[in-house]
Amino acid sequence: MSTTESRQDIRGPHCVPVTVEINGRGRVVDVEPRVSLLDALREHLGLTGTKKGCDQGTCGACTVWVDGRRVLACLTLAAAAAGHEVTTIEGLADGDELHPMQRAFLENDAFQCGYCTPGQIMSAVKLIEEGNATTDEDISEFMSGNICRCAAYPNIRAAVRQVRDAAGGAA
Amino acid sequence: MTSVGTPVTRVDGPAKVTGAALYSAEITPPGTVHLAIVGSTVAAGRVTAIDAAAARAAEGVLAVLTHDDVPAVASPPHLLPSLLGAAAPGESFFPMQDTVVHYAGQPVVLVVAHTYEQAHHAASLVRVDYEAAPAITTIDQGRERAYDAERLFAGLMPGREERGDVEAGLARADLRVDMSYRMAANHHNALEAPSTVAVWNGGELTLYESTMGVRATQQTVAQLLGLPVSHVRVITHFVGGGFGSKAMVWPHTTLTAMAARIVGRPVKLMLTRPQMFTSTGHREEQEQSIALGATRDGRLTAIRHDKLSITSLFDDWAEPATGVSSQLYACDAYLGVHRLIKGNTMTPTFTRGPGETLGMFTLETAMDELARRVDLDPLELRLRNVATTDPRGNPWSSGGLEECLRLGAERFGWSGRNPAPRAQPDGDWLIGTGMAVAAYPMAFFMPPQRARARIFADGSATVATSTQEFGTGVLTMATQVGADALGVALSDIEFQAGDTDLPNSTAAVGSAGAGMVASAVHEAGTALRRQLVDLAIGDPGSPLHGVDPASVTVTAGRLTSSDRAGATDTYGELLGRNHLSDAEATGTWRPPPLDTPHGLLTFGAQFAEVAVDPQLGLVRVRRLGGAFAPGRVLNPLLARSQLMGGMLWGMSQALLEGNHTDPRTGRWAETNLAEYLVPVNADAPEVTVDFVEVHDDVVGPLGAKGVGEIGQVGVAAAIANAIFHATGRRVRSLPITPETVMEPTPAAAPT
Ligand code: FES
Ligand code: FES
């Protein structure tokens, strides 16, 4: 055991400032180049709504939008998001007014433990915009990158349908 | 107007859909540093050398700790299920006390660094040398060493259940059905990894912990560290799923506290997904066999049920597989035997529907086979054998099985089913339907449960107990129960939980969580209401002064009496007049005694339709239908979700989930979510859930029997029976994978 902060023979990269626009606000975060967007959000920016389920790109819990497209934050380096617009679950509601998809998840009980939920919602909103929510088969297929271990799947489909139909059937 | 029984949306829903809900790893006290654990790469042997020089030199590293640095535990851990309310280590072993390695992944080195990346990078630089010893991690490797387990669950249950003369019963039978299965190990894979944040303040420790039992964590860590229980506080706001993996207290939690004490900073640990396969137990690899003896008209004369499974070197743990098969059907001769093999694995642990889901898979696929042999509809065979009392002759605390079977069958469209296998082709697919009984025992091992209710002069109220929310909806249901008991509007009451500083409640396992919390909250709310009603009656300033307490009702905080029309008081005014800023009461619920003269099972019935492509071995579940009699349904919206989730877990158990160790290395072969399959949205069919109402006044003041596991029981059997119906073949292993379903030549179809 030893304290090595002052040592000269350091190994590991230095921090670099990364400028990202997050939920409409410019933020600068000082992180090592190896830090993922997910860890930058959760550990450095206090935005813990985006979840870490696997850190391996297999579960979808970390889904955020970069320039309006859904991406896995655990497979994206924070530095690679520099100069881009990132939207997280915290940026979805309009003040106290929930986004229709958030309301639909609540009303359809589309979650239990809630850990997959931010990722599911970020995916679900895009699904409709992408035109991939026209049928139940499409919804299940295109939502299959987001694992829900509590298996709220039928209710997640119901929530997506509800928003799609309220929006007048985006397809 | 009562709130209990209405489909209120989750009170924690807004926090969960906005990302505001905080899970344990999301708590970052000032100065927090990060812990990474290095696990053993061998499954047996000893650590011979640790070269930590590179790790110590890596940027940001505060400490690299080995067995030489980790303090000795104050008293050795002893496995005890957390439901008992005492310390509950997941295994009777604590790592890093010496150099011996008992299982792959066992912690051998701890690395603490300023950031997560620094800790994990440095951990990758640690070099550990081992002297590996031969390891036993599979049943096949240890078969000759199998022994009869005397007691299971740390002595809580006998390893053997026996009544009547099974051999005679089988000999007397007109026919006999024998089934045997191999079942792969399962890993819980909650979506949130187990996480701990340990903060010391002098000699006092606060843990933010992802646990299904804050109280169990508090007591276990206190015992291991030699601290007074009062010096350990455990806080759990939200848990990202448990499924049994967070029901016991595993070594990483205490190791985090030890590391935090050594570095003098708050330490955060979040296990990695691969580490989740070696850190919180698993459902053990097992083999089950069953022999049914029956008369020609399908009445059971004997059941013999055997389970062989692998446990750790230090604990006799087996999921009990015979709790339902020993009492579901009327049958005079029964023998259930658990045999164990000691191997180089962690101690297995509770995994959703512990034991009985696989026990019922075995029983209910055998019953399906029996139905075929005696030429009875599978549903009729069940009805013919249903036990009207438990084996001791005690009445069920509440029943409902027959009603579940009939309702489920009706909703599914079971009647008129052609029993012949392979009779329903649909293009390349063969369609089949199957059913099974669901039943799950209720366990009342917990100590008395307490809750506190409090009301303030402005009319707002709280109820509190130390339980934790991990997706069961307990926060919502307890809020509803509290509102009704106290007589206030749902919007005026808040339920507080997830903190050992709140009144005692036990770890939420065995489907008991919501029921026991609701019972305690009901008692607390009722006690406070009585206290306030008495205050009003004794208060000369109250319009209700002197009325009969039995005549008083309270709704939305307003007291009225059937004896004095028009007279009303409110909690707020009452408190104000009496110069009270608030009032509070504690309520205690005592579970029924273990020898209560009642049978304690929750009942249901499961139905499944599958499509099988026999050439590709594909199985698609087209629909699932379940009918359940879980007693009082506190919130139908949430209960339905919980049951549906359980049913999809049953589907997953049938078709997807299985892990194996590599017999050469003793390591788990599948340690991520790409290889260990769990259902995704496209795997999940539509699910129908129906309720059968039964009244139960044995299980608690609200009569709620719990919905956590019953949804899962029987589903795998219903699916396997449907696969048989589709194909005419019985698969003898779980999960039922494509290669086991695939038929060698499509033309060689059995009739
Ligand atoms: S955390 Fe990114 S996919 Fe799982
Ligand atoms: S709600 Fe628990 S993982 Fe989806």
Image (spheres, grey):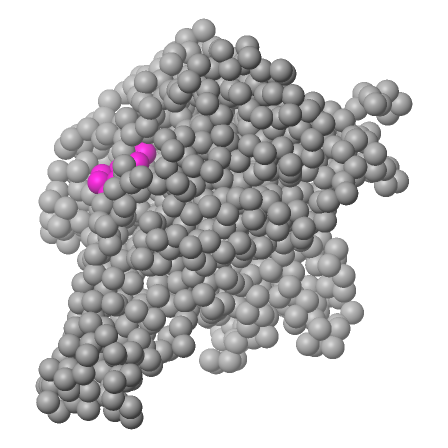
* Residue B607 in view of the camera: yes
Residue found 25% across the figure and 85% down from its top: B563
The quadrant the C terminus of chain B occupies is top right
Residue lying furthest top: B144
* Residue B499 in view of the camera: no
The foreground one among A155 and B54 is: A155
The foreground one among B620 and B687 is: B687
Residue B371: quarter of image: top right
What's drawn in magenta, residue-wise? B81-91
B96 with respect to A166 (left or right)? left
B644 with respect to B263 (left or right)? right
Q: Where's residue B318, x and y in %?
A: 40, 26
Q: Does the magenta stretch include residue B498?
A: no
**Magenta stretch: dominant secondary structure:** loop
The foreground one among B685 and B225 is: B685
Q: Where's residue B282, x and y in %?
A: 44, 32
A171 with respect to B693 (left or right)? right
Q: Where's residue B302, x and y in %?
A: 51, 20
The foreground one among A13 and B465 is: B465
Q: State whether residue B746 is above or below residue B603.
A: above
Residue B418: quarter of image: top right
The quadrant the N terminus of chain B occupies is bottom left
Q: Does the magenta stretch include residue B90?
A: yes
Residue found 68% across the figure and 24% down from its top: B374
Residue found 64% across the figure and 38% down from its top: B379
